């Protein structure tokens, strides 16, 4: 990777992050400092803006303020560029693509050359047998 | 002209039929097998999650727009070959536009196969009704009326269209 290295920068930093969803302000100036090399959990009751914070970090929700990911100022970046810095996002309601097969869902998640199905299939052998099945028909999927 | 049994079929009709089948097969292959096709189908379902996988969805949908425009251009060309003795005229699509819309609604938004089936259905209903009933006095438009009735029945019975995914 080019640019600032992960060792000297926090993984994520925000300053005065403000975001609104359909007119109502959800985030009122969030200052977040996530050190690299660790696990950070954000706790809070329903509706305080945990999900909105994550979505704003990815650029899925428009926001103002400053966001730095691995030292890059990503404010205003398109979502896919932020993700390609190495950000993964797994929403709570497991938003698999219901009308795509398991194999197509996996194929979609690949960036760049080199298939990693094998690693996934080794972790979850059942998926290999179900590779051709529509993801929406798996148990626990949103249908 | 090509002769099939006792019937003479204009070559233009065969070209249009063949091109339509090739285009349907090509688009189906593109959407099912290629990475861009998978991105497009996933993006139609949940655009944000495709973005969250690090994919530039905007580029994929620009491609959709280009393919749609090219397909419409090809349709105009084939239309002129079949109905206008290969003359092209900027207003030749006016009559077809409403039928194209009806075909997509009957087939179901988001379904290529649905549109293909609906195109055959609408075309055959229109032609058969016009041929067998349309010769009577004041019945010249009965074929078009029958197509509108098919649309009404489909919307009543299956609002999503024959193979539609979105209501």
Image (cartoon, rainbow, N blue to C red):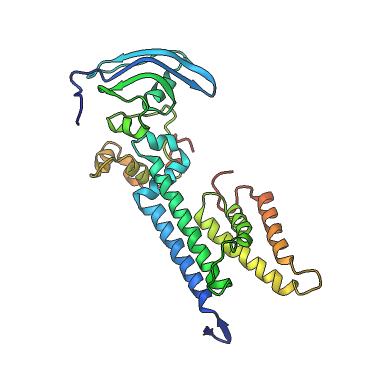
What residue appears at the point 43 percent right and 22 percent down from the top-left corner? A63
What residue appears at the point 66 percent right and 53 percent down from the top-left corner? B154
Q: Position of residue B86 (x, y in %)?
A: 53, 73
Give the residue at the far bottom of this rendering: B6
Q: Count all numbered tags in the image, as a single digit.
A: 0
- Quarter holding the C terminus of chain B is top right
Q: Position of residue A131 (x, y in %)?
A: 35, 46
Residue toward you, B89 or B55: B89
Q: Is residue B130 above or below residue A66?
A: below
Based on the displayed image, in which of its 4 quarters is residue A106 positioned? top left
Residue toward you, B157 or A54: A54
Q: Position of residue A100 (x, y in %)?
A: 42, 45
Q: Is residue A134 visible?
A: no
Based on the displayed image, in which of its 4 quarters is residue B136 positioned? bottom right
Q: Is residue A121 left or right of residue B76?
A: left
Q: Position of residue B78 (x, y in %)?
A: 51, 68
Q: Is residue B28 above or below residue B58?
A: below
What residue appears at the point 47 percent right and 54 percent down from the top-left corner? B68
Residue toward you, B101 or B133: B101
Residue toward you, B158 or B5: B5
Give the residue at the far right of this rendering: B137
What residue appears at the point 35 percent right and 18 percent down from the top-left corner? A66
Q: Is residue A111 left or right of residue B18?
A: left
Q: Is residue B4 above or below residue B16?
A: below
Based on the displayed image, in which of its 4 quarters is residue A68 positioned? top left
Q: Is residue B94 visible?
A: yes
């Amino acid at each position: 990777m080019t640019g600032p290295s992960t060792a000297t920068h926090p993984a994520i930093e925000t300053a005065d992050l403000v975001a609104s969803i359909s007119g109502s302000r959800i985030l009122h100036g969030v200052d977040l400092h996530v050190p690299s090399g660790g696990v950070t959990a954000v706790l809070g009751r329903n509706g305080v803006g945990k999900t909105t914070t994550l979505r704003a970090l990815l650029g899925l929700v428009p926001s103002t303020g400053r966001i730095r990911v691995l030292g890059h100022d990503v404010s205003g970046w398109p979502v896919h560029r932020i993700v390609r810095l190495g950000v993964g996002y797994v929403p709570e309601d497991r938003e698999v693509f219901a009308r795509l097969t398991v194999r197509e869902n996996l194929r979609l998640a690949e960036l760049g050359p080199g298939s990693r199905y094998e690693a996934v299939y080794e972790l979850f052998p059942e998926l290999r047998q179900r590779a051709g099945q529509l993801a929406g028909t798996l148990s626990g999927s949103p249908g | 002209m090509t002769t099939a049994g006792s019937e003479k079929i204009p070559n233009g009709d065969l070209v249009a039929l063949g091109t339509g089948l090739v285009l349907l097969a090509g688009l189906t292959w593109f959407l099912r097998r290629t990475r861009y096709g998978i991105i497009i189908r996933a993006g139609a379902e949940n655009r944000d999650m495709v973005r969250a996988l690090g994919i530039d969805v905007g580029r994929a949908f620009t491609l959709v727009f280009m393919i749609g425009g090219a397909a419409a251009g090809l349709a105009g060309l084939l239309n002129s070959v079949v109905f206008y003795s290969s003359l092209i005229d900027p207003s030749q699509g006016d009559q077809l536009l409403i039928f194209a819309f009806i075909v997509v609604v009957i087939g179901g938004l988001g379904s290529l196969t649905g549109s293909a089936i609906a195109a055959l259905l609408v075309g055959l209903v229109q032609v058969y009704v016009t041929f067998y009933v349309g010769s009577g006095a004041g019945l010249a438009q009965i074929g078009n009326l029958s197509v509108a009735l098919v649309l009404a029945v489909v919307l009543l019975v299956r609002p999503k269209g024959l193979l539609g995914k979105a209501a």
